[in-house]
Image: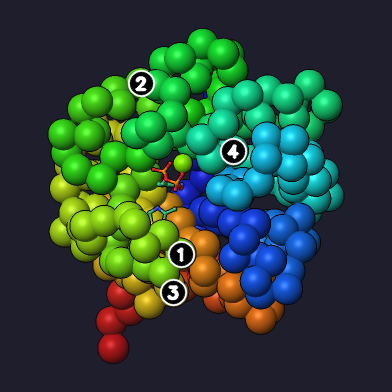
Amino acid sequence: MSALPAGIYLVLDADVCGRAGHRPADVAGAAVRAGVGTVQVRAKRATARELVALTVSVADALRLAGPAVLVVDDRVDVALAARARGAHVDGVHVGRRDLEVDDARALLGPDALVGASAALPEHVRAVAGADYLGSGPLRLTPTKPEAGPAIGVAGARAAVVASGGRPVVAIGGLGAADAPALRAAGVHAMAVVGAVCGATDPGGAAARLVEAWDRAAAPAVAR
Ligand SMILES: Cc1ncc(COP(=O)(O)OP(=O)(O)O)c(N)n1
Ligand SMILES: Cc1ncsc1CCOP(=O)(O)O
Ligand SMILES: [Mg+2]
């Protein structure tokens, strides 16, 4: 199984990229070259066929920009179809209305990376087989206005405590300024959509997030 990289996790939203005038594969490549370790392909309005084509194009971009982990939001069938076309796809991120974690793993194979959404401690228990947990929204966000309620950093910390040592990925309204508090809460990675896909310069925005994450880990220097 690919381990989930710590740090910045890009949820590559095709609609947000499109509104900002970016090709998703270009955004993914620029983000990975800037140090982003994980890319999730998310396209809520795409057909299955469009999502397969998008996933293959992102996998191609990552092959040149890599190394990075690639997962597909929601759709195990799309991950399998992209693999069948020769794309390297590590796994899926499943939500509460998608296939169950164990079913996703049975289809994708034992080495697949299977992440699951789990905002609250009771959700964490329901996704016992997941390799990592996506917890949020930390804040209300225009990218997913129907998500909620906001759990805040305290909610992310509660997910870390309930996670049984599995990596927790925080998501929802996050930016570089959140890195210190999230790292202090024991969060493994910070997922962003708008902060990269909606930026004028996605590669530069990704680099600033990576730097903020790395800087947040630096030990305090005595003055
Ligand atoms: C890393 C990560 N965490 C949570 C989510 C939300 O997933 P989901 O519940 O499936 O909602 P949608 O993204 O599908 O609207 C995520 N995508 N990634
Ligand atoms: C997919 C998702 N799940 C919870 S919040 C969210 C969107 C996060 O987007 P942004 O980083 O732009 O706030
Ligand atoms: Mg989903």
SS for dot 2: loop
Residue at 65% across, 29% down? 79
Among all residues in the image, which is located at the extreme bottom?
223
Q: Are marks 3 and 4 in contact (CB under 8 Å)?
A: no
Q: Position of residue 93 (x, y in %)?
A: 48, 36
Q: Are marks 2 and 4 in contact (CB under 8 Å)?
A: no
Dot label at residue 208:
none
Q: Are marks 1 and 2 in contact (CB under 8 Å)?
A: no
- Of the residues under marks 2 and 3, which one precedes in the sequence? 2
Q: Are marks 1 and 3 in contact (CB under 8 Å)?
A: no
Q: Which residue is mark 2?
A: 129
SS for dot 1: loop
Q: Amino acid under label 1?
A: Thr
- Of the residues under marks 2 and 4, which one precedes in the sequence? 4
Beta carbon of the mark 1 residue lies under 8 A of ligand 2: yes
Residue 51's place in the image compared with 28, above or below, is above
User: From mark 2 to mark 4, how far is it between C-alphas?
Assistant: 18 Å
SS for dot 4: strand
Q: Amino acid under label 2?
A: Gly
Res 67 seen here: yes
Residue at 66% across, 30% down? 78
Q: Amino acid under label 4?
A: Val
Q: Which residue is mark 4?
A: 72
Q: Say whether residue 94 is left or right of residue 198.
A: left
Q: Quadrant of the N terminus?
A: top right
Which-is-in-front pick, marks 4 and 1?
1
- Of the residues under marks 1 and 2, which one precedes in the sequence? 2
Dot label at residue 176:
3
Residue 223's place in the image compared with 141, above or below, is below
User: From mark 3 to mark 4, how far is it between C-alphas?
Assistant: 24 Å
Q: Which residue is mark 1?
A: 143
